[in-house]
Image (cartoon, rainbow, N blue to C red):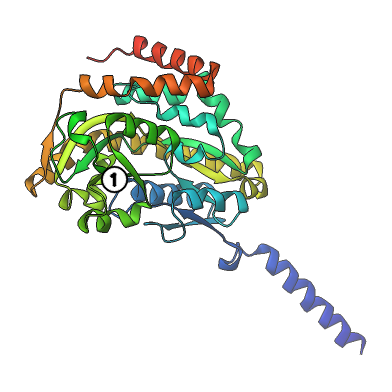
Amino acid sequence: MQRRTFISRTLITAAVAAAFALPLSAGAVTTLKFSHTDQPGGARHKAAELFAKKVADYTQGRYEVKVFPAGQLANDPKAVEQLQLGGVDFTVSSTGTYATHLPTLNLSLLPYLVENYEQGWKLYDESKWLNQQFAKAPAKGFRFLATWEAGFRDMTTKDPLGSPADAKGKKLRSFPNEMMRWTLEAIGFNVQIMPLPEVYLAIQQGAVGGQENPIDTIYANKFYEVAPNVTLTHHVYSPIPLTMSEKTWLKLSPADQAAVTKAGAETAKWIRNEIRASDDKQLAEMQSKGAKISRPNLAPFRDSVKPVYVKAKEKYGADVDAFLTDAAAVRKALPAK
């Protein structure tokens, strides 16, 4: 009996030691959900996949980021709500989407704030006012990790759009955001709100006469097929900050928080260069497939949206002055050529 007990204890001790000696099993990997509304061929999806790879690498495989494109899990506003609840771990969307929860971020969509990518990057990286707004997000249930790129917003319409006069009475799809609605209505459009995955069919069936989005989004969703007039109004600079559920963030160790932050920042650098380099190539390809690319005189468009600044000042007061001061400093430091 004593010999049998000794053997049993020896086997148990050996088994426990072996278990601690083994590397983490597949079952120990934590899966995190990344939701976005872009198509698989778009830069947003490519960036999400790159981010997922970097997170896996920098956490030594402890975390797997699973990417769900094309609104599979949620549209943009619902994805942010899911961040707050912890049902989704990451998303990327226009800054304006987050303004539902941080209203001052509506000001990030003021029209014609910057004139090129370099100015936009500097504004989002260095604006004291903007970063103060981002710092309020954890209290709302999500956290800004890095500013990814989408580009400047342009128009795709069934009918030509040479000036604001051509917009009068036309239905144009956009996303739910106060500042964007003010801008598009000032240009002359009747704004129709709908989720991005529904837009192609809505234009095809005549429910709306067009939509507005950055070039990469237009290209990835093939909006030029149903609204072939691509007008480069560049009315709003529209990056897509990467955000994370605060509930998920708080579950990570400090080392893993640093790893996720590093992955987000490195991916931001990649997608910024990717978007800037792809604009002209994508426009050329769309043109080869029948799209009509127009570069209108922007002066009438700039004039038409001046009332938006007046309305913004009435509602947001000193925040408008603070952000416009930062934007003016950026334009002065990096003048457009």
In the picture, the quarter occupied by the C terminus is top left
Q: Secondary structure at mark 1?
A: helix
Tell which residue pokes out farthest to the front in this image: 169
Residue 336, x across and y down, in percent? 26, 15
- Label 1 Cα neighbours within 10 Å, binned few <14 / some 14-19 / many ≥20: many
Q: Measured along the vertical axis of the image, is residue 334 above or below residue 91?
A: above
Residue 230 visible in the shown view: yes
Residue 42, x across and y down, in percent? 29, 49
Residue 257 is left or right of residue 68, and the answer is: right
* Amino acid type shown at disc 1: Thr
Residue 59, x across and y down, in percent? 55, 49
Q: Measured along the vertical axis of the image, is residue 90 above or below residue 123?
A: below
- Nearer to the camera, 125 or 167: 167
Q: Residue at x 86, y 87 (%)?
A: 4
Residue 55 visible in the shown view: no
Q: Name the image quarter holding residue 172.
A: top left
Q: Residue at x 23, y 53 (%)?
A: 203
Q: Residue at x 44, y 54 (%)?
A: 75
Q: Measured along the vertical axis of the image, is residue 193 above or below residue 23?
A: above
Tell which residue pokes out farthest to the right in this image: 2
Residue 62, x across and y down, in percent? 57, 56
Q: Residue at x 46, y 27 (%)?
A: 107
List the residue tagged with mark 1: 217
